Amino acid sequence: MDRINPAASRAVGSALGGAGVKLRPHRMLPLNKELLGKFPKELGESEFNVALGLGSRTNAGAGVAAFNQNTPRDCILRRLYVDDGNVRGRVSSFQIGGENVVIGDSFPVAAFRATTFVSPEFDFYSKAGTPIQVSITYDAAFTADAGFSID
């Protein structure tokens, strides 16, 4: 189940738009076989949770919005959303379970705004209780809210 049959992939690719369409298995499937059993006939409470809020931070001047949260259950962290009123800022630190997600100096926060259509999707598998830390450095006064879409 964690491999795609090449002949089936070509057949589906041809049906979807020609030989240029390629399918690949989701990268999380080989890592956690429990995901394959994540399709219950009756949905439990956790299947209705599709967002993980990180909270809200406010500062009267330039400064850092530090969001810290532990995942309440096993989940896949899909996309980070930030609503900050378009104040110029940079994601200066982003860690999941102590592992750095941002490499280098910083990353523009504009890439994670809800109005941005082309945003990074992370697809990080996270066990319950895994710490998430996101720090955003702003150049002016701000009120920032942040959260993840999850599965």
Image (spheres, rainbow, N blue to C red):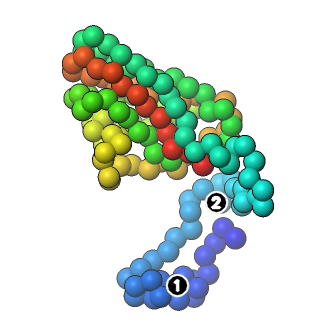
Residue at 72% x, 60% y is: 39
Q: CA distance from mark 1 to mark 2?
A: 20 Å
| Residue at numbered disc 2 | 29
Which quadrant of the figure contains the N terminus? bottom right
**Amino acid on which disc 2 is placed:** Leu
Above or below for 141 versus 49: above
Instruction: Answer left or right for 77 relative to 119.
Output: right
Quarter where residue 103 is shown: top left
Q: Residue at x 41, y 39 (%)?
A: 81
Q: Position of residue 97 (x, y in %)?
A: 57, 32
- Residue 109: image location, x then y, percent: 30, 35
Q: Circle 1 — which element?
A: helix
Where 150 falls versus 109 (above or below)?
Answer: below
Asked if the residue under mark 2 is in contact with the one under mark 1, i.e. CB atoms within 8 Å, the reply is no
Determine which quarter of the picture holds residue 34. Answer: bottom right
Q: Which mark is residue 12?
A: 1
Mark 1 or mark 2: which comes first in sequence? 1
